[in-house]
Every structure is written in C-alpha cells, then in structure tokens.
Image: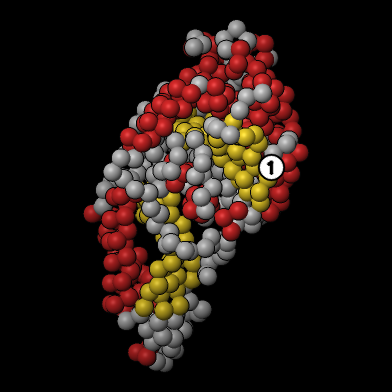
Amino acid sequence: MRSKLAVLVFGAAAPFAALAADISAAHSEVIQLVETNAAAYRDVSRKVWEFAEMGYQEKKSSALLQETLAVAGFDVKAGVAEIPTAFVASWGQGKPVIGILGEFDSLPGLSQDAVPERKPLTAGAPGHGCGHNLLGAGGALAAVSIKDYLAAHHLPGTVRYYGTPAEEGGSGKVYMVRAGLFNDVDAVLHWHPGDSNTVTTGAGMLAVITAKFEFHGLASHAAAAPEKGRSALDGLMLMANAVEFLREHVPSATRMHYIVTKGGAAPNIVPDDAELFLYARHPSMTVLSGIWERILKCANGAAMATETTVECRIVSSDADIVNNAPLGERVYRNFTEIGGLTYTPAEQTFAEKLFALLPTGTTAKLGTERLVQPLDRERGEGGGASTDVGDVSWNVPTIGITAATWVPGTPAHTWYATAASGMAIGQDGMVLAAKVLAVTAQDLFTDPALLAAAKADFAKRMEGVRYGSKIPVGQKPPLDYRNSSR
C-alpha cells in the first residue's frame, strides 16, 4: 500500500510514471489502459452533459453510450426491461461475470454553464446536478479498459455494462432486476460523483418509497354553493398536516418530503382533483415499510374526514444498500493505492471561486480532493441520498465508490454540481473512478478467493431475509413519471 504522502501528491495531472513504483504490475497495466482510453470518454461525458435528458427520456445519451461501447467491441442489447433507453453491453464469455453500472439522467431546473457563477444555459431547463453524465461515461471507460486487459491476456470471463435509466426517482434498476438481467452476475461495481473520495458501503444511504396521492372530490362554486362541493385540496392539505404531525413519532433518521403537483383550477372553484407527490426515506427498508403504512393511514383518514377519495400510485421504491465487507476492503485498498486528485492551476482557480459561493455551514475544505477518506465499514443511521443501486445489492454482491468530481463542500442536486460536472474537475474525478473500478474488476477476474469471499459475505447477510420491492408486481416502468399527472 502506498504511503499517505504518496496518496496526497498523486492527482489527475500527475504523470503515469509517478505511479509505477507504488502499484502492482497488473494494476499499472489496467491504469495505463484507462489513461489511454480516457480522452474519448471525457468527450462522451461532456456530450451527455450537454444533452441533459431526464429520466426515461435519455434517448440521445443512451444512444451515444451504446454506440461507443459497440465500437469498442461490446455486444449491445437495447430496450431491455421494457425501457426504451435501458441497455446491456457485454464482452467476453463465461465466468466470472462482472457488472459495471452506468447512469445518464439529469435533473429538472438545474441547467448551468460550466463556470463558477450562477449562469443557466437555458432558464428552467434540466441539468446534470448529480453528475450522471460522468457516471455513465466513467463506468463505460472502466468497462472498456478492463475488456482491453482481458483481451490482451486471453483471460476468460464476461464484462457487462448496464445502461440504467431514471435513477433520479424512476427506479430503472428495479425493473432491470425484475427482468432477470442480473441473475448470472457474480459481482457488481458502481460509482457516483461527489465532493470526496470514499468507498460506498451503504453508510448514510436511505431506502425510499415515492408515490403520488391523488384526491378526488366534487366541484362547485366556492362562494355561491360551497356546501355542494367536496374539496380534493382539503383532503390533500389534511393529509400533509397529518404527515407533519407524524414526524414527531417516527425514527429520527426518517425523511418525509413532498410537493403539491395539482391544487385546483381557480380559487372560486372547489377543487375536485388534487395531487401530492411524496417521498419517504429511512436507512432500513424494513423500518420504512412500517412508516409507509402509517403514511397511508394519513391519506385515508384525510379522505374520510373531507368526504373525498384518494388513490395512491407508487412511482418508485429503492432499497437500502447491502454492504459487502470483502469487496469494500479491496476497493479501499485499491483506492488508497491510486490516491486522490490534484487540481491544475486553472482547476484550482475555478474551485476557489465556486467554493466562495457555496452555502454557509459547510465543514469541507479545499484540498480534501487529494485524500481518500477512511473506510466506513458498516452503515450508520445518518441521513443521505437514495439510489436504486440498493435493489441490485440485494440480489448480487455489490460495492461502489464516490470520487471527487465536485469542489469540496458541493451539495448534490445543485447548480454548483452541474458546473463542475461539465468541466475538467468533474472529468478528472471520472477518470479516477474508472481507474478504481477497473483495477477492482481486474482483481475479481484474477483472484477467485476474493470473489468467493464476496459471495460468502453476501450469503451471510441475506440469511433469513428476502428481497421485495414496494413497486407493485406487474407495474410497468413509469416512463412519464416526470409529468405531474398520470
């Protein structure tokens, strides 16, 4: 393992020769392949950033990644799991089968130029505020690079890249799991953009259930005949109020947040239709399931009190992440072996300008992008984001990382993240992530003991538990979920 000093000084701008003395020959070869392939995938990430397509609408982004992988020699199957933009790209034959995940959906309202000041490219348009342009391209870079290594050494095994749409609230991976696309996979690797370099063990990640609650009432003149109306909006507001009271009586790690997507046509008409879009989260899906039953009581009770009816339509549901200790330890070793990032002078200037604009209260410091954070070996109870990677991890040994693609202290889902995701800082972090994934994949292909340990750990964690999504069996992927109504 490299010394701490070596970890601190290595960065994207450092020459590859600086690594040779500290990294094994096999890892050095894979890292060099990533470096060789990187320029093309930097370009892919930028194009996907410019496309900025939202969940299940990522036609150009998906097509570009499919074409890029096909040119690299992968066999591409498009439109899988009844999702037009989902695909699986495979290379090789036989076991082991190692999967690498890719995402490419953007977020609404986060359009932003790649500059350290607020400057939307198109006001109100989508933007890559979660860096999925980097995520998709970086996963593909890792897949192609490990494919090149296996081909050069005539090694058996299958590399499989999963193009997974609509991570942001659409649960695309859940439908891909249900379609059996992970059934023969031995291990899955993934990564995500962030403001630090960490191993993703599931710490701070939350299971989530999202649904649209549509209340139906009776329209009437709000002034001339209010007694003849039954307000759907009243039902919605009463439900929301009940959820607010519920906050006091759920575990502290619970998160509940919502928006009103339909509230009526005009103030002088009693609304006969209203809709609440709600998210509920908790570190444990088991606990969240019980909380969700209480949220449903809030909805049904509100409908009863206002003499309206309510319909609950599940939009998405992502499980919590199942950790894998052997994979986590190996990824951490590989990450610290490779090290973090060092900004170029131009990147440092960008980072300093953007850092000065970040919301107050951040404890992050510039320079931490050079570090690999200590391994959090088991998940805690802290709040955080949610991801449909969790559903994959309930079905196959899975491990991931975050890489410092954003200026330290940058919150996800902000214009700050969009800005860095479209320029060199984000792309440098993407290449770093590809290196870590590629050398870990190399270990899985060449070290049977590691894969056996990962499978044993997975089997132990799954004893007595059974995977099941809150998304109703038979429900089709909600390709229009970004719409406020059906």
Residue 154 image-quadrant placement = top right
Please give the name of the residue rendered at 35% of the width and 44% of the height, measured from the top-left corner.
283
Looking at the image, residue 190 lies above or below residue 266: above
In the image, residue 265 sits, relative to residue 485, either above or below, namely below
Taking depth in this image into account, of 457 and 58 the one nearest to the observer is: 457
Query: Which residue shows up at 64% across the image and 21% down it?
Result: 30
User: In the figure, residue 353 lies in which quadrant?
Assistant: top right
- x, y percentage for residue 370? 54, 21
> Where does label 1 land, which residue?
75
In the image, residue 327 sits, relative to residue 172, either above or below, namely above
Residue 291: x, y in percent?
A: 29, 56
Residue 84 position in % (x across, y down): 64, 57
Which residue, as the protein is rendered here, is positioned at the far front? 94
User: Is 204 on the left-hand or right-hand side of 265?
Assistant: left
Is residue 452 visible in the rendered image? The answer is yes
Residue 210 appears in the rendering: no
Helix, strand or loop at label 1? It is: strand
What amino acid is found at the position of numbered circle 1 in the picture?
Answer: Asp
Extreme residue in the right direction: 71
User: Residue at horizontal 61%, vertical 12%?
Assistant: 25
Find residue 1 and report its horizontal and vertical position in percent.
49, 12
The image shows residue 167, relative to residue 293, as above or below, that is: above
Q: Outermost residue, top direction?
A: 21
Q: Is residue 355 left or right of residue 200?
A: right
Q: Quadrant of residue 19?
A: top right
Left or right placement of residue 385 versus residue 485 in this view: left
